[in-house]
């Protein structure tokens, strides 16, 4: 009797652990962006966060979903990708609104300084359909980002549909998906390097990146996920550590401050 009770307790604990692990896999990836989202909302300044992070994650997760049509992987990872795509769109919407509001206020201050109150305050519109590579991923409205994501998804889906029977293509697609995700931190790494500072970047976000990526890589190894998943997971952890080293270095050895205008220009050309 005692043995049966013990077995039931062990089975219940195992079930609970599996549920917790599943929840961590599905929602753990979006948790790091909560403090960054709150910081941007609070300060109304998105300069410290590279929106190219959103671009990388959108591409990676769209490709991962398409990869599943050629090679099956756990449904949890599919839901993780869907939720991550939604989260990145929310972050993009916030950053676009904040950036446009900041530019509008700057323009207004400039007009007031020159006593041109009667002139209309205008901000140059940058649209996806203009196809100007100088302003790629720096568009003025959230709808332009949506158009770009939709266009990429349709093109990638069509190519996948045509080449789905090719094993080489499917494996390459899977590698590109996880490799793109592994490069998640590189836009932020480069943005910090250009600004010579990590000001405006949520350190909590990077710490959560590191812990989440470590957990995720271990999960891939334990569940014998495709080799592309865990090898790129290790690379992702290394990039996270490099960003944390930047935090330490720039806080201990402050660099020459970069002007707000210069910072915006360099981050715009980050990739």
Image: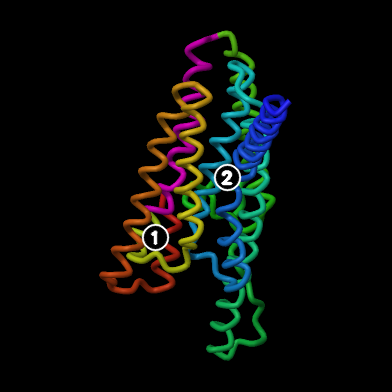
Q: Is residue 105 above or below residue 53?
A: below
> How far across and how far down the image is residue 40, in percent?
58, 66
Q: Nearer the viewer, residue 1 or 95?
A: 1
Residues packed near mark 1 inside 10 Å, few (<14), some (14 to 19) or many (20 plus): some
Q: Earlier in the sequence, mark 1 or mark 2?
A: 2
Quarter residue 123 falls in:
bottom right
Give the residue pinned by disc 1.
266
Residue farthest along the left direction in this orientation: 253
| Residue at the spot 45% in from the left edge and 25% down from the top edge | 228
Q: Is residue 182 magenta?
A: yes
Q: Nearer the viewer, residue 12 or 241?
A: 12
Residues packed near mark 2 inside 10 Å, few (<14), some (14 to 19) or many (20 plus): some
Magenta residues span 166-189
| Residue at the spot 61% in from the left edge and 42% down from the top edge | 24
The chief SS type of the magenta part is helix
Query: Which of the numbered marks, if any, corresponds to residue 29?
Result: 2
Helix, strand or loop at disc 2?
Answer: loop
| Residue at the spot 70% in from the left edge and 29% down from the top edge | 2
Quarter residue 12 falls in:
top right
> How far across and how far down the image is residue 164, in percent?
59, 13
Residue 64 makes an appearance in the image: yes
> How far across and how far down the image is residue 253, in percent?
26, 70
Q: Is residue 108 left or right of residue 219?
A: right
Q: Is residue 140 above or below residue 214?
A: below
Helix, strand or loop at disc 1?
Answer: helix
Marks 1/2: CA–CA distance = 28 Å
Residue farthest along the front direction in this orientation: 1
> How far across and how far down the image is residue 46, in percent?
54, 65
């Amino acid at each position: 009797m005692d043995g049966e009770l013990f077995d039931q307790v062990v089975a219940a604990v195992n079930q609970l652990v599996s549920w917790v692990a599943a929840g961590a896999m599905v929602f753990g990836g979006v948790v790091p962006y909560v403090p960054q989202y709150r910081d941007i909302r609070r300060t109304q300044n998105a300069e410290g966060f590279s929106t190219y992070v959103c671009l990388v994650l959108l591409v990676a997760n769209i490709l991962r979903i398409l990869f599943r049509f050629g090679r099956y992987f756990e449904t949890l990872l599919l839901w993780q990708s869907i939720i991550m795509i939604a989260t990145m769109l929310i972050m993009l919407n916030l950053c676009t609104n904040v950036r446009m509001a900041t530019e509008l206020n700057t323009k207004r201050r400039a007009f007031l300084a020159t006593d041109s109150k009667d002139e209309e305050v205008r901000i140059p519109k940058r649209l996806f359909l203009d196809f100007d590579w100088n302003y790629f991923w720096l568009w003025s409205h959230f709808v332009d980002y949506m158009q770009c994501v939709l266009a990429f998804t349709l093109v990638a889906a069509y190519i996948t549909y045509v080449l789905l029977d090719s094993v080489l293509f499917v494996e390459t697609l899977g590698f590109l998906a996880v490799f793109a995700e592994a490069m998640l931190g590189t836009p932020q790494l480069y943005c910090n390097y250009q600004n010579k500072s990590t000001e405006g970047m949520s350190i909590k976000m990077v710490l959560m990146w590191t812990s989440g990526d470590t957990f995720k890589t271990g999960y891939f190894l334990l569940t014998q996920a495709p080799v592309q998943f865990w090898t790129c997971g290790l690379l992702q952890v290394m990039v996270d550590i490099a960003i944390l080293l930047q935090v330490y270095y720039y806080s201990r050895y402050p660099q020459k401050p970069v002007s707000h205008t210069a910072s915006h220009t360099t981050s715009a050309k980050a990739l």
